[in-house]
Image (tube, helix red, strand yellow):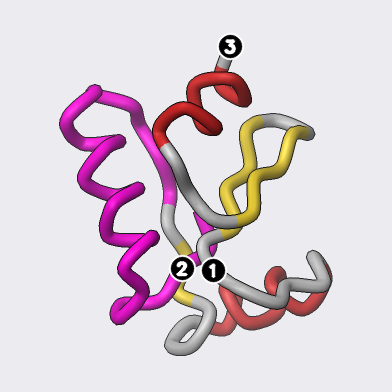
Amino acid sequence: MYSTVWCGYCKKARRYFKEKGIPFQEYDTETTQKGREDYKKLNGTGVPIILVGKKRMNGFSPSGFERLYR
């Protein structure tokens, strides 16, 4: 997940993953070099960007993530 500290949707996603026991890696797009570089390569225009294999989700909603995660 590419995120920022202040993003409300990022906080929701983080909390959801922890509650459901879903392992995830997180890269801050403002404070880490990898986060900034990857975000640019992904043509990011908002956060979070969540990647599951080759599938991508911009933003976060539990129902949208469930469809992506299956």
Q: Which residues are magenta?
A: 1-25
At mark 2, the secondary structure is strand
54 and 6: which is toward the camera: 6
Question: Which amino acid type is marked by label 2?
Answer: Ser
Instruction: Determine which of the numbered discs, if any, sits on residue 30 in the image.
Output: none
How far is the residue under mark 1 from the one under mark 3?
22 Å
Task: Categorize mark 3 by other alpha carbons within 10 Å: few (<14), some (14-19), many (20+).
Answer: few
* Label 2: how many Cα within 10 Å (few below 14, some 14–19, many 20+): many
Residue 47 horizontal side relative to residue 37, left or right: left
Residue 50: percent from the left, percent from the top?
Answer: 57, 48
The image quarter containing residue 37 is bottom right
- Residue 40 lies, in percent from the top left, at 77, 78
Tag 1–tag 2 contact (CB < 8 Å): yes
Q: Which image quarter is the C terminus in?
A: top right
Separation of residues labelled 2 and 3 (CA atoms): 22 Å
Mark 1 or mark 2: name the one nearer the start of the chain. Answer: 2
**Along the horizontal axis of the image, is 18 left or right of 58?**
left
Where 23 sits versus 27, above or below? above
Inter-mark Cα distance, 1 to 2: 5 Å
Q: Amino acid at mark 1?
A: Val
Figure quadrant of residue 49: bottom right
Closer to the camera: disc 1 or disc 2?
A: 1
* Identity of the residue furthest to the top in this view: 70
Answer with mark 2 or mark 3, whichever residue precedes in sequence: 2
In the rendering, at what x and y percent does residue 17 appear? 30, 36
Q: Is residue 15 left or right of residue 36?
A: left
**To which residue does mark 3 refer?**
70
Q: Which residue is mark 2?
A: 3
Which residue matches tag 1? 47
